[in-house]
Image: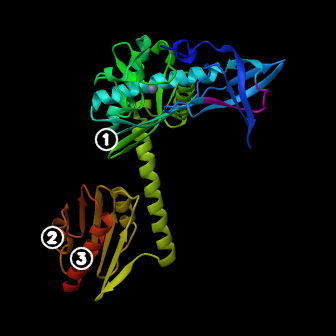
Amino acid sequence: MTSLPPYWVDPLKDQFLVTIADSRPTEEHFEITIVEDVVKAAGGGQAGDRGILGINQEEIVVRDTIQRDGIAVMLTEKGLTKGVKSTLVIDMDWRRSIMRNHTAEHLFAAALKERYPFLKPGAMWIDGNHGTVEMVGGKVGVQELFSAEKSVQNAIHRDITVSTETVNASELDKSIRARESVEAKHEMVRIVRIGDSDAAACSGTHVLRTGDIGVFKIIDYKIEEESVHVEFVTGNRAVIILYDLFNAALERRRSHPFELKQLGAVLDRGKHVSSEFAKVLEKMEHLLDRGPTIEDIDGISFRHEFLPGFEVSNLKRILKNITLDGPSAILYFTPGEKCNLVFWTNDLPHEANIYISDVVTKLGGRGGGSEQVYTGGFSDVDSPERIYDDLVEQVRALLLRR
Ligand SMILES: [Zn+2]
């Protein structure tokens, strides 16, 4: 068997003496190939190596390495003469990040598959900045996603040895995670093992111990009926993101006291307030434009308003300040998941509840009152607007009948 390339057996080896096999210009850069198999090209969802080619004090930046017809092609800023010797120094910050992200991807895919055995690998991209991974074949719960994230962090903490071996494709069995196409495409397959936790067919570069990953953090996700798509970072990049986020919350805790564990509820409340505020503005515009809604129902003045953002206590305070003169009725309604209403009458032939009590009950609410005032409410309301419209219409009809 031919010997394996250094990026597989010794991914931390970063300096090589290489011979330029070919060098040609393209529109954006130069394309250089070398005789030795020492630079890792993009492939299998993993980005290619970066580095520096050195010759006679000159340094030529290798921006990326791609694969063409099975040959690694370095994309460089300058060309070199065919046949010359050069030193190649691999950009180890970039490669180490890729190694961390790739091994983390294996741990995460394994953790998800443990929770959802039906999941299959979808699209994937790993580079030195971040990783994105997609699993397809069913719906994943968000709590399970976060629990898989935690189990990756636990595996990092356990500092498990990562080992590789090359086996005959026919030896692959169910215990090894592999894309269905692997067996058909390759005769020999490289297996990456993370202790007893995971074994997967993979041609990528990996850390030697899971502890090298440091920290694993999901930074975005999208759950769909048949797939889940996750973006993550590792190492110091993950730590910095966690610092920034935590401190942003910590800083606001000074001006808006809240428990950090309640951050989710605080954000929910914020969203609720802003949507309520939009409704209040709309209502204000309406009131400024057309004034209060007052109808004349055959000699009875009927005033009614839909009042988002208000509480029952607000309504009662407003009503206290209104002086009713002659036959009249006021219906004020506060919408929400719980809706409340106050119905106040003056100089009508019947008590207030005669005009509204049955209507409220029929619409699924409850209430009660004294001679002139009826208060009521509805819980678990989906569409407050519809309840309000129905209320107004039916109370109007009853007022008309006296
Ligand atoms: Zn892999």
Q: Residue furthest bottom?
A: 298
Mark 3 crowdedness (10 Å alpha carbons): few <14, some 14-19, many ≥20: many
Q: Does residue 34 belong to the magenta stretch?
A: no
Residue at the (27%, 58%) spot, across then down: 381
Residue at the (57%, 23%) spot, across then down: 97
Asked whether residue 239 is in view, the answer is no
Q: Is residue 55 left or right of residue 119?
A: right
Disc nearest the viewer among 2 and 1 = 1
Q: Amino acid at mark 1?
A: Gly
Q: Position of residue 67 (x, y in %)?
A: 58, 33
Which quarter is ligand 1 in?
A: top left
Q: Secondary structure at mark 1?
A: loop
Q: Secondary structure at mark 3?
A: helix
CB atoms at circles 1 and 3 under 8 Å apart? no
Q: Which residue is more in the foreground, 11 or 159?
A: 11
* Residue on which disc 3 sits: 395
Q: Amino acid at mark 2?
A: Asp
* Residue on which disc 2 sits: 358
Q: Which region is colored magenta?
A: 72-82
Q: Amino acid at mark 3?
A: Val
Residue at the (24%, 76%) spot, across then down: 395
Q: CA distance from mark 3 to mark 2?
A: 10 Å
Q: Earlier in the sequence, mark 3 or mark 2?
A: 2
* Residue on which disc 1 sits: 137
